[in-house]
Structure formats: C-alpha cells, structure tokens
Amino acid sequence: SAVISQKPSRDICQRGTSLTIQCQVDSQVTMMFWYRQQPGQSLTLIATANQGSEATYESGFVIDKFPISRPNLTFSTLTVSNMSPEDSSIYLCSVRSGDYGYTFGSGTRLTVV
Amino acid sequence: TQLLEQSPQFLSIQEGENLTVYCNSSSVFSSLQWYRQEPGEGPVLLVTVVTGGEVKKLKRLTFQFGDARKDSSLHITAAQPGDTGLYLCAGRIQGAQKLVFGQGTRLTINP
C-alpha cells in the first residue's frame, strides 16, 4: 500500500495567518483527498485534488479558504488561509491504496491562537 | 444530516467483555471500511467489506456487511486494553471515489 509523508505534524499559528500542509506519496496516484478532523470528532472531507485540474470542494468548504495545489501525481498541498481559532483541527491527506483501501497521512495538528 | 450513523459514540467496558459497534445508512455503498485511529496518527485500515452479507474475521474482531450493503457491524470478543482507540466506519458511495465517515466510536477497555 502507498506510504504518505505529511508535514508539518503540528503547528501553533496566530490568527489571520496561513499555513500550508504538504503531503508526499511514494507512488503516483490520480486523486488525493484532504480531510479535517475537529477535536474529538470524525473525519470530514474538504476536497478531492486531481492532478492537472481544479480541486473539487465539498459543501461548506471554499477555495479561497482552503486553496489546494496538485503539481504532480505524488504531491499535494492544502493551505488554511486567514486562520481563526475555529480552524484548530487535525488535517489529513489520503489516497486510494489497492482495490478498496485508503491510506492516510499521520495528520497535521493545527492550533490557532 | 449524517450519511453514516455510527453508534455508540462512546463505549467504556471491562477487559474480557464483548462489544458491538454499528454503522447504518439509508444509502447503498459499494464498499465499507473500518479504521482504527490512535492519538497523533491517521486512521489505519482494519478491513474492507464489499459483498452484501460478507463476514470477515481479524483475530478477535468480526466485521459484517449488511445484505443490502447499507449497514455494517464490528464485534470484538473478549476485549483487551490494547483495543482502546477510535474506531471509524467509512463507506464508499456507488460511483464515487470519496469516502464518507461515521461519527466514530471512542472505545475504552478498562483492565
């Protein structure tokens, strides 16, 4: 199965600033998925990132707040822009792995102060 | 509206007891997966069920997919403290690539 390297693992940021999270996959993948996991809660899909096209955002998430880059088939970034304390969450990237499974990065724990 | 309803959301039991976690939906899934997540880590895949009525066993864990592929259960026999963690069900909707997650079950096994 694919191996994902996600960084940073954690960060504490000032409100109003932006943070870019990176995910590197050890194999080429068509789609990469970005999730948010709010404290004590489950995962919510933010967007699906395809190489060579605009990301597809889920309801409640917009490109201006969460711009995504997908420059090649092994790498993607998610930026959390103009942060507020409500953005404090764990952010995870994921790719399909094998016929049915999905592999996740270890997550980025973001605290906005 | 939650597409996948997972229950219970919290469960604390004694070592040696049995437990069952449920995931239910009104939607049909092409596959359904169970993940376990430890603090500071991403979810790790435990099992994928694909066929309606399918049952899979992983040591003391038994996973079942409903006949109509709308629901699933995870049963743990003789729970151990090492089973403590967040268990997540996730379904892949027919024709889509993305996963939808249940609310998660935070399981605590007390020695």
Image: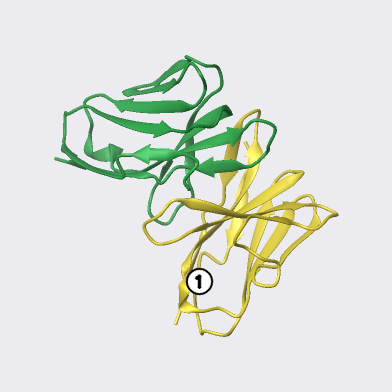
Chain colours: A yellow, B green
Q: Nearer the viewer, residue A112 or A28?
A: A112
Q: Position of residue B81 (x, y in %)?
A: 22, 39
Q: Is residue A28 visible?
A: no
* Residue pointed to by mark 1: A87
How many marks on residues?
A: 1
Where's residue A95, x and y in %?
65, 44
Q: Residues within 10 Å of mark 1 (few under 14, many from 20)?
A: some
Residue at 44% across / 82% down in the picture?
Answer: A113
Where is residue B86? Give x, y as percent. Answer: 36, 45
Against A63, residue A4 (above or below) is: above
Task: Give the SS element for disc 1.
Answer: helix
Residue A70: give x, y in percent of width and height: 77, 58
Rendered position, A33 above or below A113: above
Residue A43 appears in the picture as rendered: yes
Write the residue at 17% across / 38% down: B13
Q: Quadrant of the C terminus of chain B?
A: top left
